[in-house]
Amino acid sequence: NNSNLPRIVSIIAQAFVTKVVSSLSDIGTRMLGIVKQVESNPEVFQACASILTPEQQYALQDAYRELAGGAPATA
């Protein structure tokens, strides 16, 4: 019933916040793939995004940019 997805997305985002995982690594790419799958269902993704801190949201966006070949944003 997708009840654990918000927590899973939060954990993934926190891994990027703390730089435990690089978005360019195999694991980072797989993690971003999971988030992309969650994003394909807007209702479920909204529930997930609503519990993310601004820092976690930024880290996910930055990881996507880095994966897409753009330079990571600087704070």
Image: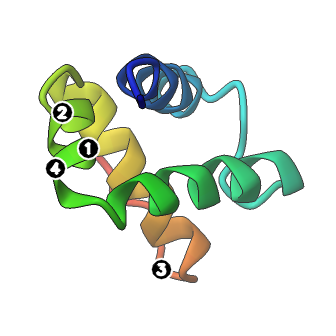
- Nearest-to-viewer mark from 4 and 3: 4
Q: Which residue is mark 2?
A: 47
C-alpha gap between disc 1 and disc 3 = 27 Å
Q: Which residue is mark 4?
A: 43
Q: Are the residues tagged 1 and 4 within 8 Å (C-beta)?
A: yes
- Nearest-to-viewer mark from 3 and 2: 2
Q: On residue 70, which mark appears?
A: 3
Query: Farthest bottom residue?
Result: 69
Dot 4 alpha-carbon crowd within 10 angstroms: few under 14, some 14 to 19, many 20 or more:
few
Q: Is residue 3 above or below residue 22?
A: above
Residue 72: x, y in percent?
45, 61
Kind of element beneath mark 3: loop
Residue 44 vs residue 16: left or right?
left
Query: Farthest right residue?
Result: 26
Kind of element beneath mark 4: helix
- Nearest-to-viewer mark from 1 and 3: 1
Q: Are the residues tagged 1 and 3 within 8 Å (C-beta)?
A: no
Q: Which residue is mark 1?
A: 44
- Closest to the observer, 57 or 73: 57
Q: Are the residues tagged 2 and 1 within 8 Å (C-beta)?
A: yes
Query: Farthest front residue?
Result: 1
Residue 55: x, y in percent?
25, 27
Amino acid at pointer 4: Glu
C-alpha gap between disc 4 and disc 3 = 28 Å
Amino acid at pointer 3: Gly
Residue at 19% of width from left, 20% of height from top? 51
Dot 2 alpha-carbon crowd within 10 angstroms: few under 14, some 14 to 19, many 20 or more:
some
Amino acid at pointer 1: Val
Assign the C terminus to one quadrant of the image: top left
C-alpha gap between disc 3 and disc 2 = 28 Å
> What is the quadrant of residue 41 in the picture?
bottom left
